[in-house]
Image (cartoon, rainbow, N blue to C red):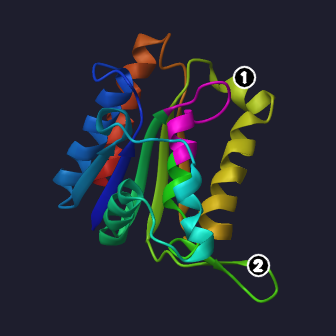
Amino acid sequence: MKVLVVYAHPNPQSFNHAIMESFTNGLQKAGHTYETSDLYADGFDACFKGPDFAQFTGGQMPEDVVKEQQKVSQADALAFVYPIWWWAPPAIIKGWYDRVLSLGFAYSISEQGQPVGLLKHKKVIHITTTMGGEDSYKGMGIEEAIKTVDRANFTGICGIQNVEHVFLYSAATDAEARKKHLDLAHSLGKNF
């Protein structure tokens, strides 16, 4: 498969970058190919602005959106690598969703007002790091809330049935966990 890896962390020396590299090394070992959208390094504008409303009027979408949509169209699967900040993805990921997964590209609306998914990708995986431990995410219902939003966006709206989210807990505080996380990321790529 060809996988589009959407990566979001502003520090190229971050642990998230190491996770992305481990995951993509696993993809290569399995014979997959990949392309990366490094949102911060590429200067992706996360702000939904006036020209983005073209999706609702049939107008020309902004060039940076079209470029990302071409990457999505050429991929068989999507992978997202990013940290969880304030119980949610970084704003640049949400902005990517807002702008790239647009009406007429990722979904349409039925006569009954329901979304109809237009994306035919085989899989979506989110690989995210957290500062806090697993208990804080599960105990407060955060993990399930994030997974519910993933399913609503990618299955309910975009039509992709296989949606997975892997949380790499305590990435900022536990050296042993970090080693395990790197191994897991490689395995996720190799077994994609």
Residue 164: in sight, yes or no? no
* Residue 128 painted magenta: no
SS state under label 1: helix
For residue 78, side relative to residue 20 (left or right)? right
Residue 114, label in figure: 2
Q: Which residue occupies 64% across, 26% down?
A: 134
For residue 136, side relative to residue 50 (left or right)? right
Residue 3 placement (x, y as % from top left): 31, 60
**Location of the N terminus (image quadrant):** bottom left
For residue 16, side relative to residue 171 (left or right)? left
Q: Which residue is mark 1?
A: 136
Front disc: 2 or 1: 2
Amino acid marked by disc 2: Gln
Is there CB contact under 8 Å for labels 2 and 1? no
Residue 57's place in the image compared with 94, above or below, is below
Amino acid marked by disc 1: Ser
